[in-house]
Amino acid sequence: MEKNNVHIDRNEVVIHVDNVSKSFGSLHVLRDVDVKLFKGENLVVLGRSGTGKSVLIKLISGLLTPDKGHVRVLGETVNELDERALRTLRQRIGFSFQNSALYDSMTVRENLEFPLVRNKRNLSRAEINKEVEEVLEGVGLSQAINQMPSELSGGQRKRIGIARTLILRPDIMLYDEPTAGLDPITCLDINTLINEVQERFNTSSIIITHDLACAKMVGDRMVMLLDGKFERQGTFKEIFDTDDARVKSFYDYNFIV
């Protein structure tokens, strides 16, 4: 299933990873990588496990510092920010983790209220209720508001995790392997949700994945990490229209619906 076209403002760059390198000892994970995310765009970062995709997310969020180059997010150079400025910037970035990162001892409602109460202390009970109900409707799980995470399926927990991220109305969404560990039908549901979030909440997103079905369905543009560099960029067809054995083996490893 190919992705529908959406409006992307290519005059506004919301993330610029500018000539960035990152090593851990003798292991060179990223080598002079350069990529931009435009406003309103879903950018897919493809690559095998261990190729540096998650390191890229940590650099964007300021959890790691590049050895070389700069990471600019929403006009701020991340690796030059102090801790306070970095916390403020992170409130504008939503993170969707592989394991959904829900608190098992809290209901769905309480999980969603937590970031609101922590970051927007002046909200009334009515305003909190409205925000919770709106994001739950946005991910199609209004009926789960009083359930515990243990009562939800893997796909439902993933949806609630995305809802909890959306409740602070981030400008940017970072998805780390959003379909990992899910069955094919649930993967399809999550991919559809990522596109709906893009359109409904006006987000710009980076989707880290090695799942080509996910990439094909959610990506407006794709980049592929090979040997620490973005060797290929473009549409799904442009990425895989090559005789490069590294790319062909990656394609053959996946199953495209």
Image: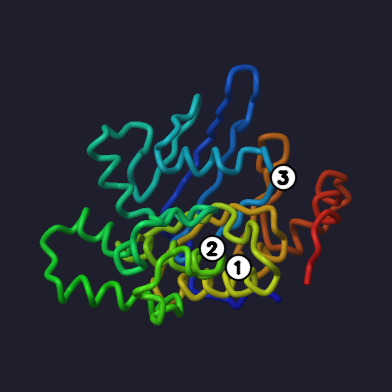
First in sequence: mark 2 vs mark 1: 2
Indicate the secondary structure of the residue bearing disc 1.
helix
The residue drawn where x is 50% and y is 44% is 57
Task: Give how far across and how far down residue 155 sits, in percent.
Answer: 56, 68
Nearest the eye: 11 or 70? 70
- Distance between mark 3 and mark 2 Cα atoms: 19 Å
Picture mark count: 3
Task: Give the labeled residue for mark 2.
Answer: 42
Q: Identify which amino acid the numbered label 3 is placed on.
A: Arg
- Distance between mark 1 and mark 3 Cα atoms: 18 Å
Task: Give how far across and how far down residue 48 sits, in percent.
Answer: 72, 45
Nearest the eye: 220 or 160? 160
Judge from the rendering whether residue 192 lies leftward or rightward of residue 228; answer left or right: left
**Viewer-nearest of discs 3 and 2:** 3
Disc 2 crowd, CA 10 A, few/some/many (<14, 14-19, 20+):
many
Judge from the rendering whether residue 58 lies leftward or rightward of residue 237; answer left or right: left
Indicate the secondary structure of the residue bearing disc 2.
strand
Disc 1 crowd, CA 10 A, few/some/many (<14, 14-19, 20+):
many
Q: Identify which amino acid the numbered label 1 is placed on.
A: Val
The residue drawn where x is 18% and y is 58% is 120
Task: Give the labeled residue for mark 3.
Answer: 48
Disc 3 crowd, CA 10 A, few/some/many (<14, 14-19, 20+):
some
Q: Identify which amino acid the numbered label 2 is placed on.
A: Asn
Tell whether label 1 touches label 2 (CB within 8 Å).
yes
Nearest the eye: 178 or 204? 178
Task: Give the labeled residue for mark 1.
Answer: 218
